Image: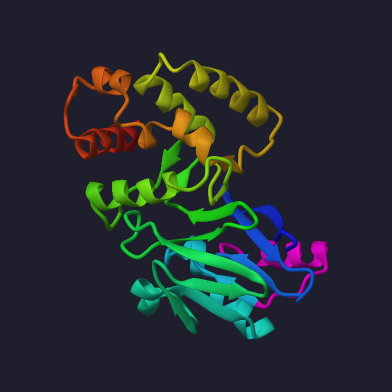
Amino acid sequence: MARLDIHMFPALWDNYCFLIHDEESGLTGVIDTPEVPAIETALRDTGWTLTHILNTHHHPDHAGGNLELKQKTGCTVVGPREEADRIPGIETQISDGDVYEFGPHRLQVIDVGGHTLGQIAYWCEESGVVFVGDALFALGCGRMFEGTPTQMWQSLQRLMALPDDTLVYCAHEYTQKNAQFALTIEPQNKILVKRSAEIDDLRAKDLATVPTTIGLEKATNPFLRPMSPDIQKTLAMTGAPVVDVFAEIRRRRDRF
């Protein structure tokens, strides 16, 4: 089976948006709708015709363009069942464990609630990609606006269980500041030190740091590493429950 075609482009101030396309069927989806003009430009650039909106969660910078795009294109709006009352124009509701058939591609739905209560991710195993919205960032994770540390940590563990080479498409360019924070939590991590320097170089050239991979995040992202003895020592939490360490990392990042 051919892999999904993916076209990534910037939107708003620091969002990334993604078109996914199946050449055989002609289907084209957009992962979230932060900015209609940017999406329309991307469609013109690719020559693709929008057929689907695939929402990860309800925040305006992810679902704010739904109704305008649906009115203009007649596309189908798909999104999390648990947030259906907050997803404009939703027609197809999906939840953890569901599989959404996008032409020949199987988009497996993963519960990644915590940033919002019902946020979902879309994993296409055959193409080796996952679209995570604001659940996981390169070297970071989403703020817990609605969920609890326990819920968020469980969600991140579901993503950590994916194959290490899975490409992670997250929705914001926060990586440089995330790296600066990560170094305050685990300065001993040589892989992180090297990665931080690479990120600084990319951003100096105005280049994207997305996508990342599950394996790289597991090796360097402090939010996926609360079990690290070095992190626990830095936080004076050696032997503490992992979820408590995770919560403290999130608190510190919120203040950073």
Residue 72, by quadrant, is bottom right
Q: Residue at x 63, y 81 (%)?
A: 75
| Location of residue 30 (image quadrant) | bottom right
Q: Is residue 36 magenta?
A: yes
Residue 244 in view (yes/no): yes
Toward the viewer: 87 or 91? Answer: 91
Which image quadrant: the N terminus?
Answer: bottom right
Residue at x 78% of width, y 70% of height? 48
Colour logic: rainbow
Q: Position of residue 79 (x, y in %)?
A: 47, 73
In the image, 95 versus 173, the foreground residue is 95
Q: Provide residue 131's location: percent of width, then percent of height.
A: 54, 56
Foreground: 229 or 182? 229
- Residue lying at the far front in this picture: please name it: 1
Residue 16 location in percent, x, y? 60, 52
Does residue 195 belong to the magenta stretch?
no
Q: Residue at left 53%, top 73%?
A: 100
